[in-house]
């Protein structure tokens, strides 16, 4: 165990109000591509850039193109929770971790057993008719073709936050509360490049800020503990 991971173990042993803030890097070890790495979605070639496709305007104007990309790249039904997801669930069960705040939309934290999961950008496992509000699950969208429609005729929209859309106020408020009350905030697997989500870190007033990320982040200088290793490799070494 490296000195950095030993320090993280000490923090986990010492405190029982830990909050985890994570991004795409938490899920890459489960086989889900991130957005900004060299092999991520933003570096792949489509008729339109992913930023354009995943915007509210594009969804409304070209829903057929949106759902073609969405089914192809956003709906992964083979991914399983990795050691990072499993350890965070274990930490919560042990009374150490109070919340997982995630920018991911893949439901892997819940699949691992985490109960307090605040999804800043929504989830591919929830879909609602834009006309009547009826709920549809993951499989309904995955198995379909073209633009999914409700029995009432309305378009079914994934409950994910697209570009140009605002975050859910209730999720934001609960995330702010959790971060502001935390003794330890662990940031993992995120470049902290997406706002307003990344700005939530400003509410932390606790004892120790931990950053676990392979690439540099804007918070590295403020971190009390910086670990540049894969998040799953790090957390798998922690005991609770």
Image (cartoon, rainbow, N blue to C red):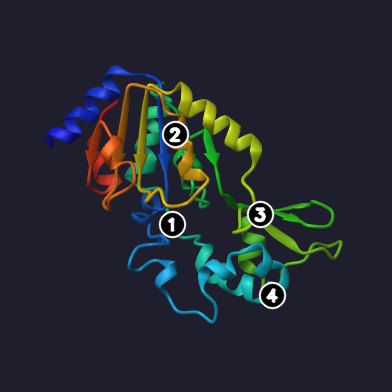
According to the image, label 1 marks what residue?
Answer: 79
The residue tagged 4 is 62
**Residue at point 42% right, 48% down?**
23
Contact? badges 2 and 3 (CB < 8 Å)? no
Q: Nearer the viewer, residue 88 or 229?
A: 229
Q: Tell me which label, 2 or 3, sits earlier in the chain.
A: 3
Tell me the mark number nearer the camera, choosing from 2 and 3.
Answer: 2
* Label 1–label 3 contact, CB within 8 A: no
- Image quadrant occupied by the C terminus: top left
* Circle 3/circle 4 CB separation < 8 Å: no
Q: Secondary structure at mark 3?
A: loop
Q: Is residue 79 above or below residue 51?
A: above
Give the CA distance from mark 2 to mark 3: 35 Å
| Residue ID at (46%, 21%) | 181
Crowdedness near tag 3: few (<14), some (14–19) or many (≥20) residues, C-alpha within 10 Å: few
Dot 2, how many residues are within 10 Å of its Cα: few (below 14), some (14-19), or many (20+)? few
* Relative image position of residue 19 (x, y in whole percent): 42, 30
- Inspect this view and state whether residue 83 appears: yes
Neighbor class of circle 4 (other Cα within 10 Å; few <14, some 14-19, many 20+) is: few
Across and down, in percent, residue 236 comes to: 26, 39
- Whichever of callouts 4 and 2 sits on the residue coming sooner in the sequence is 4
Which sits earlier in the primary sequence, circle 2 or circle 1? 1
Q: In terms of depth relative to the viewer, which is nearer, 115 or 11?
A: 11
What secondary structure is marked by label 1?
Answer: loop
Secondary structure at numbered mark 4:
loop
Q: Nearer the viewer, mark 4 or mark 1?
A: 4
Discs 2/1, front: 2
Q: Say the numbered circle drawn on residue 202.
A: 2
Q: Residues within 10 Å of mark 1 (few under 14, many from 20)?
A: some
């Amino acid at each position: 165990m490296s000195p950095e991971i030993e320090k993280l173990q000490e923090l986990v042993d010492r405190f029982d109000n830990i909050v985890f803030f994570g991004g795409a890097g938490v899920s890459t070890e489960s086989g889900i591509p991130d957005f900004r790495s060299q092999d991520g979605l933003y570096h792949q070639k489509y008729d339109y850039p992913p930023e354009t496709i995943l915007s509210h305007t594009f969804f409304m104007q070209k829903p057929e193109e949106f759902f073609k990309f969405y089914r192809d790249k956003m709906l992964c039904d083979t991914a399983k929770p990795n050691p990072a997801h499993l350890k965070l669930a274990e930490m919560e069960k042990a009374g150490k971790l109070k919340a997982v705040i995630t920018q991911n939309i893949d439901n892997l934290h819940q699949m691992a057993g985490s109960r307090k999961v605040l999804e800043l950008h929504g989830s591919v496992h929830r879909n609602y008719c834009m006309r009547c509000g009826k709920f549809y699950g993951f499989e309904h969208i995955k198995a379909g073709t073209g633009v999914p429609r409700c029995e009432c005729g309305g378009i079914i929209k994934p409950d994910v936050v697209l570009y140009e859309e605002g975050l859910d106020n209730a999720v934001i408020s609960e995330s702010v509360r959790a971060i502001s009350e935390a003794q330890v905030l662990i940031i993992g697997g995120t470049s902290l490049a997406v706002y307003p989500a990344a700005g939530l870190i400003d509410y932390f007033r606790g004892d120790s800020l931990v950053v676990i990320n392979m690439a540099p982040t804007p918070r590295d200088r403020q971190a009390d503990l910086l670990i540049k290793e894969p998040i799953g490799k790090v957390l798998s070494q922690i005991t609770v």
